[in-house]
Amino acid sequence: MLPFRLTGQPDARMPLYLYGVGTQEEKGLHRPEGFPVYQLFLARDGGGKFNIFGKESIAIGPGQLFVLEPGIAHEYIPHTRTAGELGFIGIGGESADSVLRATGIVSGGPCTLAGFDLIWSQMTDLWRALHQGGMSMWEMSASIYQFILEMAQARAPVDYVSHVHGNSDAGLEGLNRAIALMQAHYQDDLLLKHIAEAVGYSVQHLNRLFHQHYGVTGHQYMQRWRLQKGLEWLNEHPEASVKEAAENVGMEVNYFIRMFKREFGETPGKGMKLRNQLRLEQNLHLHNN
């Protein structure tokens, strides 16, 4: 076991700092006032249940990471008294919230880490550096940032979050982030794998979420959004060419024409011709009256 170590008063100039780090055997925690900084829990060869007072209970199993925000009243109850260990790292600083959220490891529930033993070893190195005093606060801050990135990279996509009570759709938040990215960047050369990486999922898992909620794959959803925006653009620019419309939504022109016909039942050129003719007839009707 690695007895919990505190860093003392951190340097206020550092955007990230290590508040403390350590491990304990499987035993309970009770913190009705919460913790002053972010807590990162690593379960090794054991597991248990976090009761978030007034909200829910969340289970964590071997090889998983769970991140708890500052000031959240909670308790931890191990499943059994085993030889398992629970590692905990306290991370503070003005940038702690943005960095942890940007990397996707603050997800409301536990996530499985690929190469968990390596992450555990890196946590041990942080403890040793703090215990031996061989690293400055600035060096420790850089090490914390690197540690967060390593955990984010090791974060394996999870099909569900194991809520003991009040289980909600765990993938909905990530799915909504993916949709927002598609809608914001449909004009860019954006592939589904880029979106999946941005929200911390595999392509396969993201596709499962899209199919579950919309009955299509992520690629099909993004393609339909581009085609819809292409149709809107053509309606707004009646004198424009089909090539310009395709380029405006980030699609190759021949592919755009083929998919447009499949989606709307006519080619964009034919649709433009019909709409322009209808617009001309309406204008003539207004002029004659």
Image: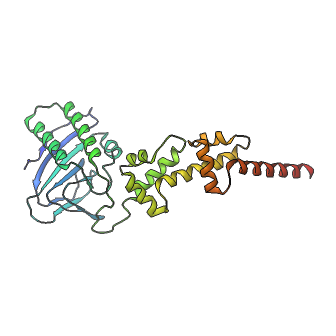
Asked if residue 285 can be seen in this view, the reply is: yes
Q: Residue at x 32, y 61 (%)?
A: 160
Q: Quarter-wise, where is residue 151 in the image?
A: top left
Q: How many marks?
A: 0
Q: Is residue 228 in view?
A: no
For this orientation, the residue located farthest to the right is: 288
Q: Which residue is at the front of the view, 116 or 289? A: 116
Query: Camera-side residue: 38 or 189?
Result: 189
Q: Residue at x 11, y 47 (%)?
A: 4
Tell whether 156 sits left or right of 7: right
Task: Give how far across and how far down residue 279 sits, in percent.
Answer: 80, 50
Residue 244 against residue 215 in the figure, above or below: above
Query: Horizontal and vertical percent for residue 61?
Result: 20, 60
Residue at x-position 9% and y-position 64%: 81
Q: Taking 228 as reference, is 56 above or below it?
A: below
| 132 shown above or below 234 | above
> Where residue 107 sits in the image (x, y, percent)?
33, 53
Q: Nearer the viewer, residue 286 or 77?
A: 286
Q: Is residue 192 above or below residue 57?
A: above
- Taking the image as shown, residue 22 lies to the left or right of residue 186, namely left
- What sort of colour scheme is used for the picture? rainbow
Place residue 263 in its image quadrant. bottom right
Q: Residue at (69%, 45%) from the top-left corner?
A: 236
Q: Residue furthest bottom?
A: 165
Q: Where residue 262 appears, x then y in whole percent?
A: 61, 55
